[in-house]
Amino acid sequence: MRTMRRFATIIFLNNYVLPEFLYKDIGSIAYGLARYYDYQASFIYLTDDKGIIKDEYYEKYVKLIPIKGYNNKFKAYCNGISFMWNNAINYDIINCYPGGIANVILGCIAKIRNRNIKIYMKFDMNRQAMHDKVNGMNRLKYKIASYLYKIFDLYTVETKSYIECLNKLKQYSGKVKYLPNGFFSDLVEIDSNIKKEKIILTVGRIGAEEKNTEMLIEAIRLIKREKLTGWKVLLVGTVTNEFKSWYEQELENRPDLKDVFVITGHISNKKELYTIYAKSSVFVLTSRSEGWGLVVTEALHFENYPIVTDCCDAFKDMILEGEDGFGKIIPNEDIGALKSAIEEVLDNKVDYNKKGKLAGKFVDERFNWKDICRSLDQYFNKL
């Protein structure tokens, strides 16, 4: 019987770590390792008095540790360095997330303080970040980081196509492994008898530049109203004031579509959100850029037929296209392609219910956190 491993995720971000982040990739690794594989886990985050996180369910498995200093970089660095110097001896493995210079420095301090500790970095990488890694956008910073990165024991990336390229870079020297992001299928129980409805769903920050939700509205506007009979388009997420104004102007000339669109706002209750996923038949993501797209994983689990833009290389691992596949990846910002893909659904030219079931089976086999954390545990065993 092995000794319980002491694990911590430490994260330094320039924005608040919100409570919902605990169940995204940021907090899911500590939670999954503790819940399923008997790790003693901590989640350490930068904040101030207003941003202290409390989550009774999460804290059954993971200790939440705030470090003061948000909005004051000097104070943040001092407190972070002090914490790591005083506490590195209390951990066996530390996950420094994401790959910014502050987290690299903290990892180095932990290694100096505790020679036996293993330092792990989980990359959160989109195409631009990958380009910068390979090409060294800031040469001096790149050279310094190249030296510091060598002391890390393990890196993981969520996109298969990035692994070989990263492992060829001297600072990683073959230490990069594949670890996708996932979904907790057993986090919330919902009614298993929920029936699918004619709902096209999108979830995200409605109106945010990178989410490009306007593309979905514009595509629906191009579709004849009679084809949309019986269908609803649900927009779930916080909504910017700019989007609200834009949306009202866009529908001035199409008042017949006002009963098609439903803007719910942000839904924090997981059971309520997952019930909407379970009722929906089609999931659309129109983002310009994504590192992973957790909402797509959630939608696949709930057997939604996915139509997504080519904004994320990981989608090629997550969504199988073609006659035997279960989804469609369309070109970025191509409203015509989105319109055509939606019309295939409306005209019953694609068996979206059958493909949704295939999607659910696929994601549950490959992208659930229990199995993902088992893979990570096995990586740790080899360090």
Image (cartoon, rainbow, N blue to C red):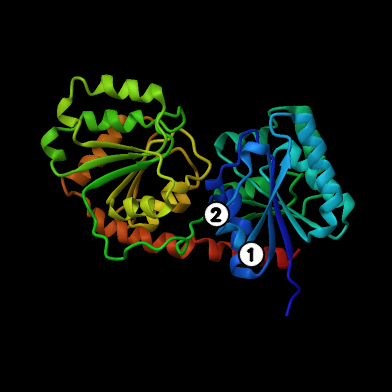
Residue 375 visible (yes or no): no
Identify the residue at image location x=46%, y=31%. 210
Quadrant of the image containing the N terminus: bottom right
| Left or right, 46 with reference to 200 | right
Query: Can residue 267 be seen in the rendering of this structure?
Result: yes
Image quadrant for the C terminus? Answer: bottom right
- Identify the disc placed on residue 140: none
Taking the image as shown, residue 60 lies to the left or right of residue 119, namely left
Residue projecting furthest to the left: 226
Q: CA distance from mark 2 to mark 1?
A: 18 Å
Residue 213 percent across, percent down from the top left = 37, 32
Q: Is residue 132 above or below residue 83?
A: above
Nearer the camera: disc 2 or disc 1 = 1
Vertical placement of 306 versus 363: above or below? Answer: above
Q: Residue at x 27, y 22 (%)?
A: 248
Q: Which residue is mark 2?
A: 180
Judged left or right of residue 139, residue 255 is left
- The amino acid marked with disc number 1 is Ala
Front-lying residue, 134 or 17? 17
Secondary structure at numbered mark 1: helix
Q: Residue at x 72, y 27 (%)?
A: 138
- Of residues 300 and 330, the one nearer the viewer is 300
Task: Give the image location of residue 13, x and y in percent.
Answer: 65, 37
Q: Type of residue at label 2?
A: Pro
Circle 1 packing at 10 Å, graded few (<14), some (14-19), many (20+), is: many
- Mark 2 and 1 residues: CB-CB less than 8 Å, in contact? no
Question: Between 232 and 45, which is closer to the camera in this rendering?
Answer: 45
Residue 31 is drawn in which quadrant?
bottom right
Tag 2 secondary structure = loop
Determine which residue is flagged by label 1.
34
The tag earlier along the polypeptide, 2 or 1, is 1
